[in-house]
Image (tube, grey):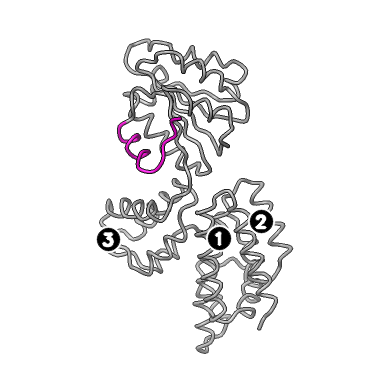
């Protein structure tokens, strides 16, 4: 069985084995699947934009005619050179096409198949794992080690350092999707360009603007103690394909701001002043829910909420298949906590 893990994956991606030209990329981290597929395509052909060198196929269409995969793989490019095939797997199986290719010699042709999460008994995964000329690579949310390397690589390019307290928060805000994490880091680097060091305020200002993701009703509902709203809006977000980690990231951002604001109010600043001058671009429609949240939680209780959300974020990375359950449970717990008001 050829299923790569850990450092084997990095070694293979750095120097793909010509004897294994069929590569299945699968898993819950769609961004990592795409990133690795892009890299494999870039090293497979001279020009990924040349339609004669790179062919794109849909898995569901191949399912009706699996032999087309074989025909494309054996086609010699019109003007010579290397050839690549990029397949986006769907809900229908075209594993028989892979089985046929497993018995055939492939020269100067790389086939990269992108798929979502596949069970071990999936026909496509089984076909690629048993074929001698294929390899299967799982793409799962980044571990702490992966995130550390990703952060260092991205910030090194911009010659930026990361403050220690900013690093701890940034780590908790990333990890659900590789491309999303990379994009957030590049936004952060652009924002902090020329500063030398990225601060905690920079991270909280830039990374994952929850209002852009339309996740505010879920977060506001949790801190206002509205469990019904949390359940309804969370379900809508899952149906829409939103990664649950993004919702927890939004909740972490909001909890941090609430804590800072609660301390300011405790020092004597009126809540109305905090609402007008504190939260960046706080939409008027959110102010009532935020006022309720500030009445519900003391600074001390918000510290506990921040720790609870950090734990949930970590658990979601460790158990990607349970991310939605973990995220919703954490938010409903906050809603229940808000009701106590004590």
- Residue at 56% across, 25% down: 59
In the displayed structure, would residue 182 be above or below residue 55? below
* CA separation in Å, label 2 and label 1: 11 Å
Give the SS element for disc 3.
loop
Q: Which residue is mark 2?
A: 234
Residue 293 is drawn in which quadrant? Answer: bottom right
Q: Is residue 260 left or right of residue 93?
A: left
Q: Which residue is mark 1?
A: 248
Give the SS element for disc 2.
helix
User: CB atoms at circles 1 and 3 under 8 Å apart?
Assistant: no
- Residue at 51% across, 66% down: 253
In the displayed structure, would residue 73 be above or below residue 327? above
Is residue 5 shown in magenta? yes
Give the SS element for disc 1.
helix
Residue 178 point in image, percent of width and height: 44, 47
Q: Name the mark on residue 194.
A: 3
């Amino acid at each position: 069985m050829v299923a790569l893990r850990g450092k084997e994956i990095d070694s293979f991606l750095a120097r793909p084995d010509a004897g294994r030209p069929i590569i299945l990329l699968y898993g819950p981290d769609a961004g990592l699947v795409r990133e690795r597929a892009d890299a494999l395509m870039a090293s497979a052909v001279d020009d990924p934009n040349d339609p004669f060198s790179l062919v794109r196929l849909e898995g569901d269409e191949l399912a009706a005619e699996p032999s087309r995969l074989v025909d494309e793989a054996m086609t010699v490019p019109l003007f010579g050179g290397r050839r690549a095939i990029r397949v986006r797997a769907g809900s229908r199986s075209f594993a028989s096409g892979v089985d046929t290719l497993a018995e055939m010699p492939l020269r100067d042709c790389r086939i990269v198949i992108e798929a979502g999460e596949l069970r071990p008994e999936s026909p496509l995964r089984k076909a690629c794992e048993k074929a001698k000329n294929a390899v299967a690579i799982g793409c799962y949310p980044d571990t702490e080690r992966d995130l550390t390397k990703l952060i260092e690589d991205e910030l090194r390019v911009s010659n930026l350092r990361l403050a220690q307290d900013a690093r701890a928060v940034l780590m908790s805000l990333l990890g659900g999707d590789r491309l999303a994490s990379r994009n957030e880091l590049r936004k952060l680097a652009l924002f902090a360009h020329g500063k030398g060091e990225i601060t905690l305020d920079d991270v909280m200002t830039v990374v994952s603007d929850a209002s852009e993701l339309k996740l505010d009703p879920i977060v506001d509902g949790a801190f206002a103690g509205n469990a019904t709203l949390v359940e309804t809006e969370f379900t809508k977000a899952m149906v829409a394909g939103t990664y649950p980690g993004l919702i927890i990231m939004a909740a972490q951002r909001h909890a941090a701001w609430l804590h800072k604001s609660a301390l300011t109010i405790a020092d004597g600043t009126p809540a109305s002043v905090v609402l007008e001058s504190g939260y960046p671009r706080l939409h008027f429609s959110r102010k009532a829910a935020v006022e309720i949240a500030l009445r519900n939680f003391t600074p001390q209780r918000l510290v506990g909420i921040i720790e609870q959300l950090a734990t949930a974020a970590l658990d979601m990375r460790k158990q990607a298949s349970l991310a939605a359950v973990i995220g919703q449970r954490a938010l409903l717990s906050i809603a229940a906590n808000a009701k106590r008001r004590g």
